[in-house]
Amino acid sequence: MDIEHRVSLKKYNTFGIDVPASHFIRIDSLETLREALAEPGLPPPFILSGGSNLLLTGPLEARVLYMDTRGREVVAEDAGRINLRVMAGENWHELVMWTLDQGFGGLENLALIPGKTGTAPIQNIGAYGVEIKDVLQSLEAVDMQTGELVSFSREACGFGYRDSVFKRGARGRYVIWSVTLGLTRKGHEIRTGYGDIAGWLEREGIRHPEPADVARAVIAIRKSKLPDPAVLGNSGSFFKNPVVPKTQYEELLRTHPGMPGYPQEGDGIKVPAGWLIDSLGLKGMRRGDAGVHEKQALVLVNHGAATGEEILQLAREIQQRVLEAFDIRIEPEVNIL
Ligand code: EPU
């Protein structure tokens, strides 16, 4: 096991924030992970994956465990379906494209989401009408206290909107090691109902879309409004979409007739945080190098040399203005360290 000291994390987080990690260990096998967890005298562990949902506000005094495992294996199959076990360190979008190349359906709506496979279940990544919970069969995680490999069924993961047991009761206890996804070989379930997917396919003249066509639509739509982290540092949606009581939503509609709202189970209405921020005229706003993306108000960006603290200040200012204008508290989706 190789322990590096004072490693710059700039290339390991999609905001491109340049802070050092006191200790950095690359994890490419179960043995290395167990050794790294058991090593005495080091600061507490921090699991670093794709760094795409992370805002670093200062030097990281931690035993950074950088997930760098590889592997994709069909573990069960019949005529119509396969189960694919994927190691946590695999890049998510490369995995999506590879499954489509193999003719497997199921992940197409989740194309172009930054990050690695192992962290996808933690916040139950979702886009264009699909969440990872819809395809995940089970996962394996390493218990950081014992080093044991533990299996979680889909139910045991306790998934919710941008949420799972790994953000609640099991927070900080496990390292996700592999995920097993249930995909289709034929009879694919094509989901074009969200946003402009159907419109894009129609404009392209595609009447009977295959999963790969849906992925092309999703990629085109995402590219049109979400910035590429390699060009402009960002972490996707910075805030979660809030759910407000129906009575409050109806009250707000009187003064803001255009406010979108999506009824949830129970009494709540989900309101797009991007709309709230946008309606305050904050798209394209800047505080130094920290800014609100000009095409999607839910995305905060680093125009170059912003510090994590500056981005956090901007996020707080936005939260405050949304609270004052709508009496709605929006919460970050991004992990702030
Ligand atoms: N809207 C605006 N102005 C904006 C942004 C959005 O008016 O600047 C309005 C849109 O017109 C639309 C509504 O808000 O009516 C929803 O916008 P969009 O479809 O872009 O989706 P979102 O709610 O902003 C969520 C996810 C995204 C995911 C998209 C598509 C969250 C926090 N974000 O965004 O996920 O790609 O839906 O499914 O749920 C991510 O988590 O990092 C992420 C990018």
Image: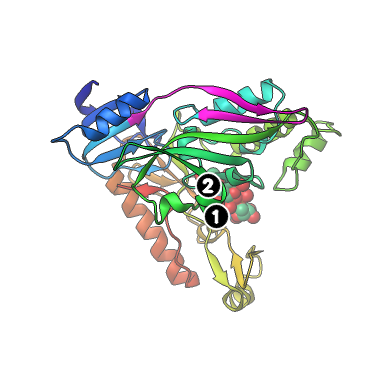
Residue 30 quadrant: top left
Percent across and percent down for residue 324 are: 43, 71
The alpha-carbon separation of the residues under discs 2 and 1 comes to: 7 Å
Q: Check disc 2 and give the amino acid type.
A: Asn
| Residue at position x 39%, y 56% in the image | 169
- Residue at point 64%, 25% (across, down): 99
The residue that disc 1 covers is 161
Q: Describe residue 161's horizontal placement relative to residue 165 as left or right.
A: right
Q: Between 112 and 290, which is closer to the camera in this rendering? A: 112
Mark 1 lies on a secondary structure that is: loop
The span shown in magenta is 66-86
Coloration of the structure image = rainbow
- Which of the two discs, 2 and 1, labels the residue nearer the N terminus? 2
**Residue 291 percent across, percent down from the top left:** 41, 46
Q: Is residue 88 magenta?
A: no
In the rendered image, residue 58, in percent from the top left (x then y), is placed at: 23, 43
Disc 1 residue lies near ligand 1 with CB under 8 A: yes
Q: Which residue is mark 2?
A: 124
**The N terminus sits in image quarter:** top left
Q: Amino acid at mark 1?
A: Tyr
Above or below — where is 337 with respect to 23?
below
